[in-house]
Image: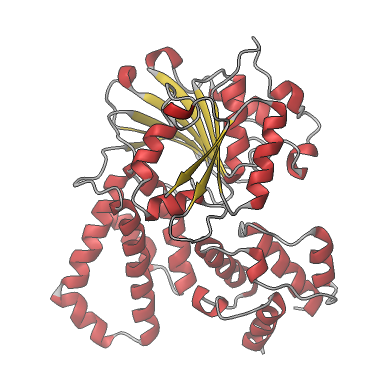
């Protein structure tokens, strides 16, 4: 999966997970274009959303990241790197 | 049900699949089913055969089994906060894929029907059996709507209605109003504003929104058919009994509440934590953690109470410290 497509997928998963503070449309696009990183704390991810994100990543990308691993990551870019690491 | 769970669990190959199974179960089980399932898992876990099996399975299988036990314990512990000796005897009646009726089956004459609109997570800010366990099955029936579009019911429910107005209109055909003592609507998060709209349009006895959207939020503003001036006005210009609850530290929800009261009179209630913790989008979590959910729900859903606090009816905005 190309990096841009992966970031697009990640944004969709984050939005669908029901986080309380999803990134704005501008920030979503900037992240997809690799012009901006997004702090995960800013998204206000609760335990259910955290599970939904991990389920989404597994279903969409075939990568098994669990909520405890997600909670140790600081940014969305970090999550992208984690996924790339699993795939390579 | 236990066999079905065990069969589905047996198909789980990863921890995320276990979580997905549990989320699905938590969105539909009754308290009776949850308690049965928990007992069966507890019994299995303490059996000699289980402990022997665990000696011979690989680490991944152990982790998967453990994830199931942890998830079930967590849900059960939330339901147990009700401090009731027995599970509430709600029985689930399937009406539609996204509409379930939970009722003990006893006469509705002395009951309140709660028309509940779930949020984006397809639940009422907590697992459904936890919500039901904190109600009395003798006093309440619950008609639960969930939105598979995850769009705050703005597109209705597939197969039932394609917009919120039609959904609310169809809702009125799903129950016999005169057979109940009272009928109220209740919605959390994305289901909050639909609950308010249902209370206004069907002239229900009360409408309660927990952390709901405001009518000016982009999702609602974008709807061609939605006109808050019209949709938030009762046919006979009466003032409905509406309660909006939000977490004291959820700035967006506070703004949404102010937005709503621009269109219609409401009573607002902000939830604060006495131990200094922030109360954000899910104020019910704070109330539940403090084991005060049963009393909160029985007051909030009582149509004879305007807003939340009897003694402070004149106060438009009140605070609840838990």
Comparing A39 with B154, the one in front is A39
- Figure coloring: secondary structure
Residue B171, placed above or below residue A69: above
Comparing A34 with B259, the one in front is B259
Comparing B145 with A73, the one in front is A73
Residue B160 locus on image (x, y percent): 60, 31
Residue B286 locus on image (x, y percent): 44, 54
Residue B154 visible (yes or no): no
Residue B220 locus on image (x, y percent): 74, 38
Is residue B112 rendered to the left or right of residue A20? left
Q: Residue at x 46, y 49 (%)?
A: B284
Residue reaching furthest to the top: B236
Residue A87, placed above or below residue B318: below
Figure quadrant of residue B257: top right
Residue B49 locus on image (x, y percent): 16, 76
Is residue B189 rendered to the left or right of residue B227? left
Comparing A81 with A57, the one in front is A81
Q: Residue at x 41, y 68 (%)?
A: B11
Q: Residue at x 76, y 76 (%)?
A: A37
Figure quadrant of residue B58: bottom left
Residue B26 visible (yes or no): yes
Q: How many numbered markers are drawn?
A: 0
């Amino acid at each position: 999966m190309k990096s841009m497509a992966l970031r697009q997928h990640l944004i969709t998963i984050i939005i669908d997970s029901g986080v309380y503070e999803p990134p704005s449309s501008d920030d979503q696009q900037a992240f997809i274009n690799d012009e901006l990183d997004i702090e995960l704390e800013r998204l206000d991810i609760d335990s259910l959303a955290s599970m939904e994100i991990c389920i989404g990543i597994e279903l969409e990308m075939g990568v098994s990241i669990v909520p405890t691993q997600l909670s140790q990551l600081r940014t969305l870019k970090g999550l992208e790197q984690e996924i790339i690491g699993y795939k390579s | 049900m236990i066999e079905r769970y065990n069969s589905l669990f047996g198909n789980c190959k990863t921890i995320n699949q276990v979580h997905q199974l549990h989320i699905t179960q938590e969105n539909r089980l009754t308290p009776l089913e949850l308690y049965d399932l928990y007992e069966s898992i507890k019994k299995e876990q303490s059996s000699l055969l289980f402990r022997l099996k665990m000696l011979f399975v690989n680490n991944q299988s152990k982790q998967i089994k453990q994830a199931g036990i942890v998830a079930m314990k967590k849900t059960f512990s939330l339901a147990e906060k009700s401090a009731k000796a027995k599970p509430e005897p709600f029985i689930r009646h399937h009406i539609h894929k996204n509409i379930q009726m939970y009722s003990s089956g006893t006469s509705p004459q002395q009951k309140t029907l709660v028309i509940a609109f779930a949020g984006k997570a397809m639940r009422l800010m907590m697992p459904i059996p936890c919500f039901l366990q904190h109600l009395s099955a003798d006093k309440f029936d619950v008609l639960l709507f969930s939105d598979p579009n995850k769009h705050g019911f703005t597109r209705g429910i597939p197969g039932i209605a394609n917009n919120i107005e039609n959904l609310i209109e169809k809702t009125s055909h799903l129950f016999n109003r005169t057979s109940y003592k009272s009928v109220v609507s209740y919605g959390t998060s994305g289901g909050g504003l639909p609950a308010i709209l249902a209370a206004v349009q069907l002239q229900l006895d009360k409408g309660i929104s927990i952390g709901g959207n405001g009518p000016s939020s982009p999702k609602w503003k974008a709807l061609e058919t939605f006109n808050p001036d019209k949709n938030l006005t009762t046919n006979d210009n009466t003032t409905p009994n509406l309660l909006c609850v939000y977490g004291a530290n959820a700035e967006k929800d506070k703004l949404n509440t102010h937005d709503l009261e621009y269109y219609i009179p409401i009573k607002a209630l902000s939830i604060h934590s006495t131990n200094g913790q922030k109360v954000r989008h899910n104020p019910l979590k704070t109330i539940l953690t403090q084991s005060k959910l049963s009393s909160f729900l029985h007051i909030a859903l009582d149509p004879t109470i305007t807003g939340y606090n009897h003694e402070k009816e004149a106060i438009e905005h009140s605070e609840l410290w838990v």
